[in-house]
Image (tube, rainbow, N blue to C red):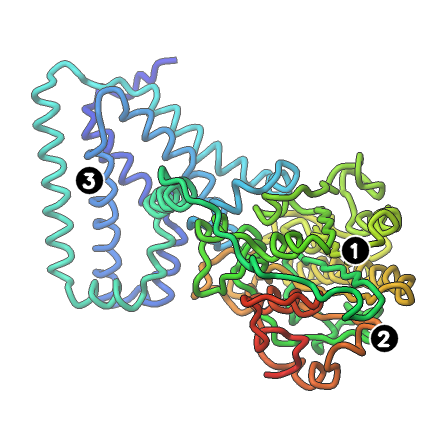
Amino acid sequence: MKLKFIKKLTQTKLILFISIFLVSFYNYSFFIEVTKIYKFDGINILYISSLFILLIAIINFIFTLVSSKYTTKAILILVIFISSFTTYFMNTYHIVIDDSMIRNTLQTNMKESLDLFNLKLLVYIFCLGIIPAYIVYKIPLNYNNTKQELINKIKSIFISLFLIAVIIFSFSKFYTSFLREHKPLRYYINPTYWIYSISKYINLTYSNEKKELKKIGLDAKIIEDNERDELKELVILVVGEAARADHFSLNGYNKKTNPLLEQDDVINFSNMYSCGTSTAHSVPCMFSILDKSDYSYKKGINTQNIIDLLHNTGKIDILWRDNNSDPKNVMNRLSYEDYKIPKNNTICIDGECRDEGMLVGLDKYIKEHKNKDILIVLHQMGNHGPAYYKRYPKEFELFKPVCKTNQLELCTKEEISNAYDNAILYSDYFLDKTIKFLKKYSKTYETAMIYMSDHGESLGENGIYLHGLPYFIAPNAQKHIGSFMWFSNEIKKDINIKNIIKNKDSKYSQDNLFHTLLGIFEVKTNVYKKDMDILNGTK
């Protein structure tokens, strides 16, 4: 189908029109964030207007620079289509598309991705993706005069650079403040920031330089049986999903979201913080020897973690069952069991496999590995959003009314909170059931359960939903996580339980997990830091 109402355009004109279109229709979130800092009145109107023109000039400059007869349309169509998705998620959930979010997205399975699809997203894709992309595809471009096209390209580049320079110098005081004091605002610029983030993700993830895996704790050993208690260790580590601390009644929340755990003699750590704000970052970080300040994806994937170290002692058998997307590279050297599928998880209803299904069959595993210490890691689906109402069976829908859509902006804060809290309530049941499972073995093993969520969650406060904001600008709700431990009477004999209780409200982080696991399994190694071991009881 020909678009008769459109005449032939030069590449430079097409790029300019698309640049104006992108800034006008894909940057609502950016300008909303700007007007939160610079109220749209007085001189600020001039500043914000200059930002509008500046963005057009920058985008026009970038696209013109990489344009060619054979790539211009393809690049513009791809950018438009991807930007329709990013615009939806930025406008709806107020998230930013940085390299961590890209990694999290690429590591999310199809089932979890489908939870995000809805009519509003399809409208965005159709109106801001398919229609403009189709128009770009059908627009006839004038390639008759190669020399003139080159001249036009050079002119466009220089005019863009000239406008950028004039605007920045004319409002130098504003832009000095803008660039120095409000750097996070650039995260909301569409499409330049997600393009930059993809480049950063590729650079951090793929490298031509092949690095040898850095081994850790090569001296690690467990005290021989004749030197330690007769009983072996049986520890279950539950990795939670999107469980923020302030929605646990263990932490004083006004709804009874932990009625069973409150009776389980757990030690609750009310001041625990995550390493990141997304599963893709937090999970590998919490198992890493690297602390939050040193951790990066590239370092993490090229360094052994606590799972490797414990396994390499030869005396600890490790089982990882995953009802989330996957172990996020933690189990790269070992295998794991996928419990998102009915083949493995026997408790699946209407396509939702429940966390408690991960407990089925553990008796058999323990029986088969009775001659060694055992670490079992259960990675929950937990409170994975935005479809919180899917995360729990119907009988756990205690708090009402409930938000029953993935379009959280259509629900009231009460409805969102109720759906989220019902999922916490179901986790309470699952975690209590896990403790009861361990109690069966308390005479034949030293048993313990450690619970630690991967990150928190925003539930609409200040218009922010879900998680994944850059750590330094993320609200506390995305970083302050639920965490507690349960110990059998036998294991309590080996730890300073009074000091642990005394320090339970001290500030801890996922950095403590590495050394706490070494402590609980009584592993001797020079990489162990006693002051980072929560069981050590000092703070």
Question: SS at mark 3?
Answer: helix
Name the one closer to the observer, 477 or 332. Answer: 332
Instruction: Bin the neighbour count of mark 1 within 10 Å (Cα to Cα): few under 14, some 14-19, many 20 and up.
Output: some
Q: Nearer the viewer, mark 1 or mark 2?
A: 1
Q: Is residue 234 above or below residue 130?
A: below
Circles 3 and 2 in contact, beta carbons < 8 Å? no
Where does label 1 land, which residue? 372
* Image position, residue 449 (x, y; %): 76, 65
Q: Amino acid at mark 1?
A: Lys
Whichever of labels 1 and 2 marks the residue nearer the N terminus, that label is: 1
Question: SS at mark 2?
Answer: helix
Where does label 3 land, which residue? 61
Task: Please report the residue visible at 59 percent of the width from the left and 66 percent of the height from the top.
Answer: 525
Task: Please report the residue visible at 65 percent of the width from the left and 57 percent of the height from the top.
Answer: 310
Circles 3 and 1 in contact, beta carbons < 8 Å? no
Instruction: Identify the image quadrant of residue 450.
Output: bottom right
Q: Is residue 125 above or below residue 72?
A: below
Measure how far apart labels 1 and 2 are at the Cα level. 20 Å
* Image position, residue 177 (x, y; %): 24, 68
* Image position, residue 52 (x, y; %): 26, 51
The quarter of the image holding the N terminus is top left
The quarter of the image holding the C terminus is bottom right
Where does label 2 land, which residue? 489
